[in-house]
Image (tube, coloured by chain):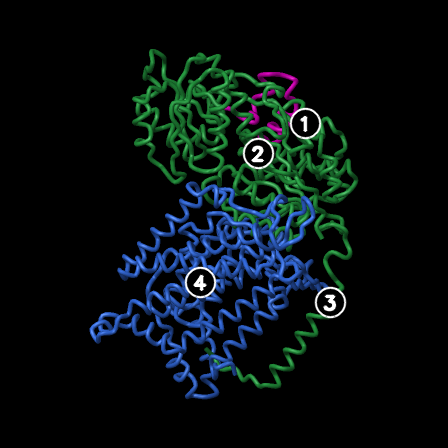
Chain colours: A blue, B green
Amino acid sequence: MLGIKGKDLSVFLLVAMLALLAPFLLNPFPVDSAMAQFNAGYPDLMQRFVIFGIFAIGFNILFGLTGYLSFGHAAFLGVGSYAAIWMMKLVSLNIIPGIIMAIIFAALFSVVVGYISLRRSGIYFSILTLAFAQMSYALAYSVLTPITGGETGLQIKPGDDPLLSNLAEGEIGRANLFGLEMGDSAILRAGGWEFTMNVGYYVCALVMLVAFYLAIRIFRSPFGMMLRAVKSNQQRMNYTGLNSRPYTLAAFVISGMYAGLAGGLMVAMDTQVGPERMFWTASGEVVLMTILGGAGTLIGPVLGAGFIKYMENIVSKINSTVLHEWFAFLPDGMEDFLVTIFYPFVGKGWHLTLGLMFMAVVIFLPGGLVEGGQRIASIFRRGKKSGAGDESAKQETPAE
Amino acid sequence: MSKYNVTRRGVLRTGAGAAAGLTLPTYLRAAAHSGFTNAPTGDTVTLGFNVPQSGPYADEGADELRAYQLAVEHLNGEGDGGMLQTFSSQALEGTGILGKKVEYVTGDTQTKSDAARASARSMIEKDGAVMITGGSSSGVAVAVQALCQEAGVIFMAGLTHSNDTTGKDRKANGFRHFFNSYMSGAALAPILVDQYGADRKAYHLTADYNWGYTTEEAMASSTEALGWETVNSVKTPLTQTDFSSYIAPVLNSGADILVLNHYGGNMVNSLTNAVQFGLREAQANGKQFEIVVPLYSELMARGAGQNIAGILGSQNWDWKLENQLGERYKGTNAFVKSFGEKYGFPPSQAAHTCYVQTLLYADAVTRAGSFEPCAVVEALEGFEFDGLGNGPTLYRAEDHQCFKDVVVVRGKENPENEFDLVEIVEVTPTEQVTYAPDHPQFSGGALGSCNNGA
């Protein structure tokens, strides 16, 4: 089906199913229960899951396949975002032109950055991309304030009157797709449960599936094979008389375009841009996502993105009051004791928890969460079929 | 990856089921049954406290959160009631808001607009918050304010000092109690001229971002109007930690005043460098060299230590106001007392503004008799009140900015303890810091109309 088959097809269908049913899968607890704290099925977070999924899929095309570690990918995300918001302010509130321009501008910028940075490899390449990203951040933060809005960023204002949209005087435009507003949701109530199905989320999910499909095709194409060759031994490739630069540059630009797409979608879902989006920590985050999920695997980056965004948005909101509620059934002394122990790891301490998880994954599961999944699966399968385990190990050994 | 046995029929069946599920509940639109976003239905109401818990302003965020917790206690009738007793509007009785018990959720803005908006959106979409408040930087305030306007909830800004929050980025659903760059300039200029003379040449070092620009503009235009000359202004990167290379040229520039348009860690470092370079002892143009810091805060004063002694700046509020200047600033002591009893030290100005904003919101809802954002906006617009520590105050309808006295302070030479680092020099009366809503420094914005959301 669609030119992909076998295992790839099942992975694709699995991702499609997860994306489609996300509003249900992410809201497993009734709204009024104590566990509702862990529900992640609200539009903003679901949108972030898939948008950062796209970002990480694109990053993985560069890092997972060629092994070039770019430390400045957030710059392309930012460029895409600024392009998209200007399209919305000036041309149309429909998200399509904005997203297309986001991809085009990110592509142009990544050609420039890639052309220069790819003259070096290894750590020098990483430093060069990092330098470009920090430069873009500084430009957006201060020097280019008239275009980027500086620290306060850009938003759609009441005075903005895009060419192709009919807005009443003073009305603030909202992002839409042919009239379907991104903020619209349908809420389904069943018993104590509440499921929010949001237009913006499903638009993102659809785009993510297309992006994921393209990534599969790239992974399985001769071009993808060439990129893997770059990773395993670029020198040997060069000695055979083959110029690897066009391949790496193409991979760099493609992954830059993915980042631009993610940036454009972020604006489409939440119509504002700030320069922090390009800060080096944002570039570092996508590296973490990819490694955490499993670099070089298809589904890994999506899992990693989901994992990190979940930590950032859910764990960071647990404060001491919530902890006290959880342990309220214990005697007072015990309650305070447990709260004291857990408190540093939740709320503002979510970075600490994330750091520990990351260390655990890197030390015990070098292949990321995907490797964890495989190990669990192989435990279950060992009893049934003896041959299945080594087959999967052979096929899906993560590249890094 | 493990093996999945996917059959064509299975896929079709699940797909059809999901499609049916998607089409079914469209009539249950969030809009249909409430009238406005997150209308509280049960016997509780949820407020969202969105403060920086990590990053450069984490200290201020922590103090803001303390103030919010105190405000919630007082609204629910616990504790000693704090400013509820001194507040000129006696609508609040300590029975929650409109009889509903106040609950709250917290989030971390990380002082990044993206993170702040993500956190605010989760409060609105997941926790059902009907009002968002907090923050310790203007970038975040502007971003979250725009989000609240779009989503149809009220935003009560925390610490944000840039002109833009109620200037070019003002929004109908957003309100700011804190003062701004213009007010700092207008309040400081006469006192600077009074203290240092009208024939002065100023050199500005400005943090290279939005707040820095508006503050520099305000300071330069207010002092120039009174006869000062601006010799030079240099932008410094926000991430700079060593300002030696920026301070060195100041002495030979012909200037005799250094204005540090810096905040937080920037200000602590640049001031320390300036003092180390001997600027406090230097003479220029036959006069004593002086340093000015337009926006002061207790937390920064603590960071700068001895170096802050004798340096002039402005504040929104100070915990010693009522003790030193009397009855006009009533409410101050009531707040300081309940804050001190709960936490063991006096509150910062960030804590004060956040506490007051929460009370003002609760009061507006009570007077409007509804949580509906447009009703709250109407109740707050043009609202005159007293007894919240700043003296008589007006929430101006044209731009949703509070107008009140501005406190001019100076670093103490011999502080008695670590909370008593500044002394109040003078309080600039409201009339002197009031400006027209379409003042050039605030132009280009429009409130738009209030939004009830869904």
User: The numbered mark 3 sits on a residue in which chain?
Assistant: B
Q: In this view, does A91 lie above or below B389?
A: below
Q: In this view, does B203 lie above or below A202?
A: above
Location of the N terminus of chain B (image quadrant): bottom left
Extreme residue in the right direction: B369
CA distance separating discs 3 and 1 = 46 Å
- What's the residue at 61%, 41% (across, down)? B133
User: The numbered mark 4 sits on a residue in which chain?
Assistant: A
Q: What stretch is highlighted in magenta?
A: B314-342
Residue B239 appears in which quarter of the rendering?
top left
CA distance separating discs 1 and 4 = 50 Å
Q: Let me know if marks 4 and 2 both belong to one chain.
A: no
Residue topped by disc 3: B25
Q: Let me know if marks 1 and 4 both belong to one chain.
A: no
Mark 4 touching mark 2, by CB under 8 A?
Answer: no
Q: Let me know if marks 1 and 2 both belong to one chain.
A: yes
Identity of the amino acid at label 2? Ala
A299 displayed left or right of B255:
right
Residue topped by disc 1: B394
Residue B161 appears in which quarter of the rendering?
top right
Q: Which of marks 1 and 2 is nearer the N terminus?
A: 2
**Is disc 1 surrounded by few (<14), some (14 to 19) or many (20+) residues within 10 Å?**
many
Q: Is B338 in the magenta? A: yes
Residue topped by disc 2: B351
Q: Earlier in the sequence, mark 3 or mark 1?
A: 3
Identity of the amino acid at label 3? Pro
CA distance separating discs 4 and 2 = 44 Å
Mark 1 touching mark 2, by CB under 8 A?
Answer: no
Q: Is A278 in the magenta? A: no
